[in-house]
Each structure stands twice: as C-alpha cells, then as structure tokens.
Image: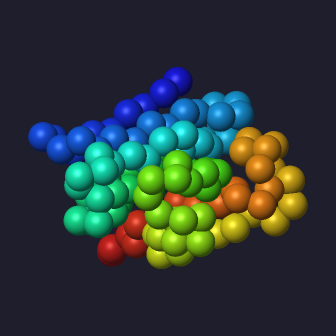
Amino acid sequence: MKHSYHLSGIRASADLMRVGIRSDNKWLLTRLEVGRELRGQGFASMLLDHVLENADKKGATIVLSIEPDGTGMSEELLRLFYKSRGFQPITGFHPITEFSETAMIRFPKLACVRK
C-alpha cells in the first residue's frame, strides 16, 4: 500500500510504502521532492513534518535511504536534515532499505497522556 502527501498549491510531494507484515507498522519513505524553484524555502521541512506527525499518530516507524539526486542537497546535508527530524543511522545491513551506509530510521514519538 502506498501513501502520498502533497502541499496544497505547491510542487512538493512525498511517497511512503508499507513494508513488512501489517503488524510491523513500518513505512519506507520512497520520495520527498520539492520543485527546484521552491527549494531552500522550508517546504521540504513542512512536508516531512506533516508526514511524521501522521506517522506518530499511527505509531509507525519510518525508514529511508538517502539518495541525493544531484540537483539539491548533498548526502551529508540530507543526513543532517533527517537527523534534525529524529532519524538515526542504521548500523549494519537493513533488509528494508538494503543500503546500510545511507539508511536511516525514525521510531514514532508517543504523545504524552494527560490525566
């Protein structure tokens, strides 16, 4: 199953795909893209924050592989960008991404329950 997110009226989108068995609740972020003319204005951050907010509500773990497209941020800057959103490097081989050097994972943040 695939989920797509878009910012209304802006050329920015993200795609996620469920991986593993349903009870795992793991999603692979397959694409996060902002139009070249809109880069550097915070749209990727807004879009990713929306994706992560929904993932947290669903208790979903997000996995990704950093793959710069050559027209935007470098691998190092992308790694810092995702780290600032709670992603951690995956050490060793990860069966979902198959790319141990560039794979990152983010576990859901659980909402605090007020009494």
Total marks in image: 0
**84 up-or-down from 67: above or below:** below
Across and down, in percent, residue 12 comes to 29, 45
Q: Would residue 50 be visible to someone looking at this image?
A: no
User: Residue 111 location in percent, x, y?
Assistant: 41, 66
On screen, residue 3 above or below 84:
above
Quarter residue 27 falls in: top right
Where in the figure is residue 9, as x and y percent of width and height? Answer: 12, 40
Residue furthest top in the image: 1
Q: Residue furthest left?
A: 9
Image: 32 above or below 88: above
Relative placement, left or right, of 61 versus 5 is right
Percent coordinates x, y for residue 60 in the rendering: 54, 49
Camera-side residue: 73 or 63?
Answer: 73
Give me the residue at 33% from left, 74% from top. 114
Toward the viewer: 14 or 114? 14
In this view, the residue farthest toward the front is 71
Residue 68 is left or right of residue 113, and the answer is right
Q: Is residue 40 visible?
A: yes
Given residues 1 and 90, the one toward you in this image is 90
Q: How is the image coloured?
A: rainbow
Q: Residue at x 59, y 64 (%)?
A: 75
Q: Is residue 108 above or below residue 51?
A: below
Residue 72 in the figure: left or right of residue 37: right
Which quadrant would the C terminus be assigned to in this image?
A: bottom left
| Residue drawn at the location 30% of the way across and 50% of the way down | 36
Q: Residue at x 54, y 40 (%)?
A: 30
